[in-house]
Amino acid sequence: MTDPREFLVTLEGLRSEAQSLLTDVPAGEDLDSVSASLIRLAVHAAVSTLDTPGIDRAIRAALDAGASAAQVHETLVVVSGLGVHSLMEGSRRVLDAVVERGDGPSEQLDDERIAMRDRFQGDDPYWVGFEEEVPGFLDALLRLSPEAYQAFFDYCAVPWRTGAVRGRVKELMSMATDATPTHRYLPGMRLHLKNAVKLGASRTAILHALDIAAAAPSHPGVPAAG
């Protein structure tokens, strides 16, 4: 039997991986107070933490730092997408399992699926990088559920259309939520770190965001209303 500890991703391992990806990135400027406060809100509001008292404090701290209501709420929209990791890790496994049983989708995509892939992915470098970190997910999702495939792209695009928060800060908050003690999703951390660098994030800012992530609490549970 495989020892599950062989697959354990630790905070130290995440930090080490980040350092290896930042070797050639200039130290640069640190996070400004608004960006830091929004990233702190992100790690408290992510479903893997969902610290409601911490969310309250982080919202007020972000507003006090000068963030707008639109920026604060867009942060929640960004991190609400964390649930797609269930699709990322599950869809490929579903496809593998049904193919093993000889009951999977055909090898060739039909015309409708090809058109969807061309429309949503095309040759966009963003999705090329995404495929490198989460190989096979988009193909599996498209084969298993074109509806879920389209919904994935539509929902993920919302905070990029509204644009209240700068792109690199969105990438940093996404990276941070993937690096919290209760999530530790290495593919996402790597993806969003690389994207943040492409958008101009400095090594100092990235490591600060990871420090914020590492300080996030365990999931305390959410009491019922009333």
Image (spheres, helix red, strand yellow):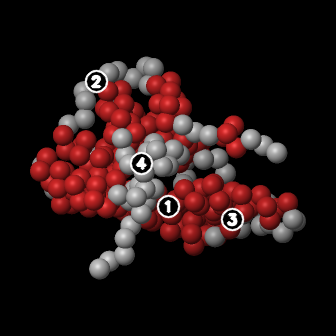
Q: Are marks 3 and 2 in contact (CB under 8 Å)?
A: no
- Looking at the figure, which quarter contains the N terminus? top right
User: Could you tell me which secondary element the residue under label 1 belongs to?
Assistant: helix
Q: CA distance from mark 3 to mark 2?
A: 43 Å
Residue 12 can be seen, yes or no:
yes
Q: Is 23 located above or below residue 158 in the figure? A: above
**Residue type marked 2:** Gly
**Residue placed under numbered mark 2 in the picture:** 28
**Residue placed under numbered mark 4 in the picture:** 177
User: Could you tell me which secondary element the residue under label 3 belongs to?
Assistant: helix
Q: CA distance from mark 1 to mark 2?
A: 32 Å
**Residue type marked 4:** Thr
**Residue type marked 3:** Arg
Q: CA distance from mark 1 to mark 4?
A: 11 Å
Could you say which is closer to the camera, residue 165 or residue 93?
A: 93
Residue 83 - label? 1
**Residue placed under numbered mark 3 in the picture:** 143
Disc 4 crowd, CA 10 A, few/some/many (<14, 14-19, 20+) = many
Decide which of tag 3 and tag 1 comes sooner along the chain.
1
